[in-house]
Image (cartoon, rainbow, N blue to C red):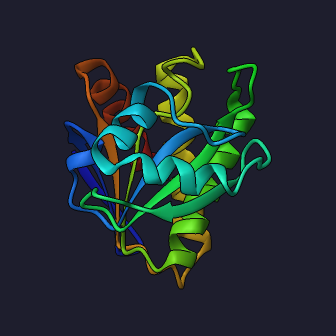
Amino acid sequence: MKTTIRNVALEIVPGDITELEVDAVVNAANNQLWMGSGVAGAIKRVGGEGIEKEAMALAPIAVGDAVATTGGALKAKWVIHAVVMGQDLHTDAATISKATTSSLAVADRCGAKSVALPAFGTGVGGFPLYACASIMVGEVRRYVAGHEKTGIKRIVFSVYSDAIKAAFKNALAGLSRF
């Protein structure tokens, strides 16, 4: 599924976020920026341990904030580490909202024209999938609508299961109300 807001394409792409042809991929991070399992583990495995070393040198950062590192051996030039949880591995709606906006702002500052986002906090964080998708799509809509001069031209929701795809498809379908 694909839609457009202010000349910015929003789309759902199934598969491995580490294989996407985008300028930046987003990692749902903890505030110490160490990369364990899930999306972070995949990024470190494919992109190299240097990404984690570079990230940890920037830590700690506040929950909800984001920072960028190089993409190492990834196809993406940058990895944006969006802090979705602290060391307690807990997240909530407000944090997912802020981390989404922070990710896009960092992507803009890096000069990324395309960015891929995973579902924030739905793995280790245990946040409900449909609520996450709704929050993230809503924040993307607000960001794009409020930043006329954004350089981002393509925002991808990277999904690795049918359940995640269905949640983001439902959230994107809701954009037709605006």
Q: Position of residue 63 (x, y in %)?
A: 76, 41
Q: Is residue 48 above or below residue 122?
A: below
Q: Is residue 100 visible?
A: no
Picture residue at 64% right of the left edge, 47% below the top? 99
User: Closer to the camera, 6 or 129?
Assistant: 129
> On the rendered structure, is 133 left or right of 47?
right
Residue 153 drawn above or below residue 72? below
Q: Residue at x 42, y 46 (%)?
A: 49
Residue 39 appears anywhere in the view: yes
Judge from the rendering whether residue 143 lies leftward or rightward of residue 16; answer left or right.
right
In the rendered image, which quarter contains the N terminus?
top left
Give the image quarter of residue 124: top right
* Residue 23 placement (x, y as % from top left): 33, 68
Quarter of image, res 151 = bottom left
The percent position of residue 36, horizontal first and vertical second, equals 50, 28
- The residue depicted at 21 percent of the width and 60 percent of the height is 21
